[in-house]
Image (cartoon, rainbow, N blue to C red):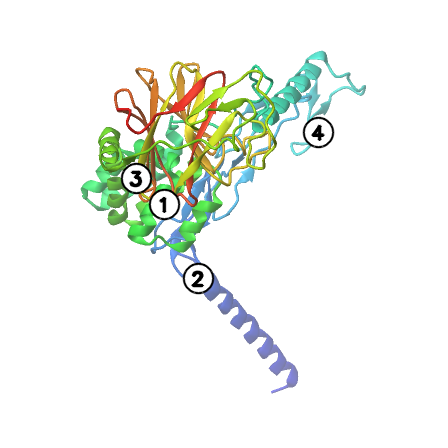
């Protein structure tokens, strides 16, 4: 055999070999809607409107996906991309928005009258040879956009709206309790798929209570994650993945999808956890029966200069023209609030605060590590990850933690607000101490001792003595 023939045969053999290797490596799944994951399993692609997070845990199952951010990004086909596509923006000088960006489709822009595209991929331009002047409406539109952007910035910095003194008293970043139907579409489809292959009662309950489950997990994501991990040892990639998701809704959907894909046992466990916490009045009475009533003392070194702390350390009074106070590293510089000298790092306790008719107040708890000197929300109780509070303002009540708000339905306005803390069980609750009616419960994995925290504007707050029943 000639050397050239040997070389040709070797070349052809090499091509066939590498072709075979590439086919083996591709090892495509039979279903076109699936892909071969790194773990060797065939996983379903993420549906439009979501992004890929992790491969499936069982052959033929759905990958773990999380929804795209409405109005920010989208995905218009089935895929395994870890990032959604960014929504396009229309040039408001030359284009009108024909269709807003959704989680499954990009923004559609249409040229304004007098403008056209030379090519579909090019921006709109003037149709005449002479450049047109920018119209008054375009200038007004640009001004409005800049104004809105400025307001959003000021809200995020707690600079808007303003109180009487010119200090910021509110922020946004609200947690909506309404559940859009499309948000629950993916977990609902996963449940319905399970229901077709199983008659277990847990799937019917899960399907029926899905909005309530979503709401509970959204409000207390890390509590449920922590409890589920203690009971079932959640996959470490899933556990860490939740912390990587910054959007509240996406975190809740991710946990729901994971639990559904894991099967009946974890779904039943999650149901029991959430249903057990629904009877809040029973929970309140149980805590009060087992807790020790206390009367913490306020630490004057932490009190804002506008707060006068009584000699017995039980009362904080807001003063319009306060006397000067010596500077102290623990003193709050911008917000009229104060912490207690005592702290709680274990056990079950409750205390009551006489709020009278004060209309702008916060009652809560805080870590000692809360910041003191900054003018933003990092120092304001309830508006950061280091504090929790109940806020009464204009006869409306809200529970706040880490800039997330839960609106509360309060019938009779309490003149005394009670606070119950079971540190070991990670429960913090608020109640009307006049009639022992439950107001709100926080579930949290506390990592530091907790101090009583009070904030008051134009009024007096007093921590009740132990023997006042």
Residue 155 appears in which quarter of the rendering? top right
Q: In the image, is residue 75 above or below residue 391? A: below
Residue at mark 4 to residue at mark 2: CA–CA distance: 45 Å
If you read the primary sequence from the N terminus, does the residue marked by circle 4 or circle 3 appear first?
4
Q: CA distance from mark 1 to mark 2?
A: 36 Å
Picture coordinates of residue 95, whole percent (x, y): 65, 22
Q: Does the rendering let one see residue 122?
A: yes
Dots 1, 3 in contact, CB < 8 A: no
Circle 2 packing at 10 Å, graded few (<14), some (14-19), many (20+), is few
x%, y% of residue 57? 36, 55
Q: Nearer the viewer, residue 400 or 371?
A: 371
Residue 273 on image: x %, y %:
27, 41
Q: Nearer the viewer, mark 3 or mark 2?
A: 3
Q: CA distance from mark 4 to mark 3?
A: 72 Å
Residue 118, numbered circle: 4
* Disc marking residue 225: 1
Residue at the image point whose x is 33% and y is 54% from the top: 233
10 Å neighbourhood of mark 1: few (<14), some, or many (≥20)?
A: some
- Earlier in the chain: of badge 4 and badge 1, it is 4
Q: CA distance from mark 3 to mark 2?
A: 58 Å
Is label 4 in contact with label 2 (beta carbons under 8 Å)? no
- What residue is pinned by disc 2? 27
Question: Which residue shows up at 69% across the image and 23% down it?
Answer: 116
Pointers 1 and 2 in contact (C-beta within 8 Å): no
Q: Nearer the viewer, mark 4 or mark 3?
A: 3
Q: Which residue is mark 3?
A: 348
Q: CA distance from mark 1 to mark 3?
A: 23 Å
> Taking 354 as reference, is 229 above or below it?
below
Q: Earlier in the sequence, mark 1 or mark 3?
A: 1
SS for dot 2: loop
């Amino acid at each position: 055999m000639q050397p050239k023939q040997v070389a040709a045969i070797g070349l052809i053999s090499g091509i066939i070999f590498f072709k075979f290797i590439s086919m083996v490596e591709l090892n495509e799944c039979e279903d076109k809607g699936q892909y071969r994951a790194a773990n060797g399993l065939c996983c379903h692609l993420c549906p439009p409107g979501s992004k890929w997070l992790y491969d499936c845990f069982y052959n033929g199952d759905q990958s773990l996906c999380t929804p795209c951010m409405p109005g920010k990004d989208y995905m218009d086909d089935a895929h395994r991309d870890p990032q959604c596509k960014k929504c396009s923006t229309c040039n408001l000088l030359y284009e009108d928005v024909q269709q807003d960006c959704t989680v499954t489709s990009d923004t559609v822009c249409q040229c304004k009258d007098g403008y056209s595209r030379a090519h579909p991929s090019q921006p709109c331009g003037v149709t005449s040879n002479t450049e047109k002047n920018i119209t008054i409406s375009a200038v007004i539109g640009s001004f409005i956009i800049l104004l809105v952007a400025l307001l959003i910035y000021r809200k995020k910095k707690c600079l808007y709206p303003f109180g009487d003194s010119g200090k910021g008293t509110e922020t946004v970043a609200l947690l909506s309790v309404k559940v859009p139907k499309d948000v629950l579409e993916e977990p609902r489809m996963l449940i319905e798929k399970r229901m077709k292959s199983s008659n277990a009662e847990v799937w019917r309950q899960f399907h029926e209570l899905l909005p309530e489950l979503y709401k509970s997990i959204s409000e207390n994501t890390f509590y449920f994650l922590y409890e589920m991990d203690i009971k079932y040892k959640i996959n470490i990639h899933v556990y860490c993945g939740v912390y990587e998701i910054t959007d509240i809704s996406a975190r809740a959907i991710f946990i729901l999808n994971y639990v559904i894909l894991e099967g009946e046992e974890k779904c039943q466990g999650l149901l029991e956890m959430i249903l057990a916490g629904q009877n809040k009045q029973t929970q309140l009475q149980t805590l009060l029966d087992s807790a020790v009533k206390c009367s913490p003392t306020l630490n004057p070194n932490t009190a804002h200069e506008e707060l006068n702390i009584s000699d017995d350390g039980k009362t904080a009074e807001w003063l319009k023209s306060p006397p000067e106070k010596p500077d102290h590293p623990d003193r709050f510089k911008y917000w009229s609030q104060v912490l207690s000298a005592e702290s709680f790092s274990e056990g079950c306790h409750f205390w009551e605060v006489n709020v009278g008719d004060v209309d702008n107040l916060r009652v809560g708890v805080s870590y000692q590590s809360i910041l003191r000197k900054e003018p933003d929300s990092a120092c304001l109780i309830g508006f950061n990850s280091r504090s929790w509070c109940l806020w009464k303002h204009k006869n409306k009540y809200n529970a706040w933690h880490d800039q997330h708000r839960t609106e509360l339905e309060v019938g009779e306005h309490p003149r005394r607000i009670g606070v119950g803390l079971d540190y070991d069980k990670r429960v913090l609750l608020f109640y009307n101490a006049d009639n022992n009616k439950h107001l709100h419960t926080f579930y949290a994995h506390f990592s530091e001792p907790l101090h009583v925290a009070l904030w008051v504007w134009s009024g007096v707050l007093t921590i009740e003595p132990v023997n006042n029943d």
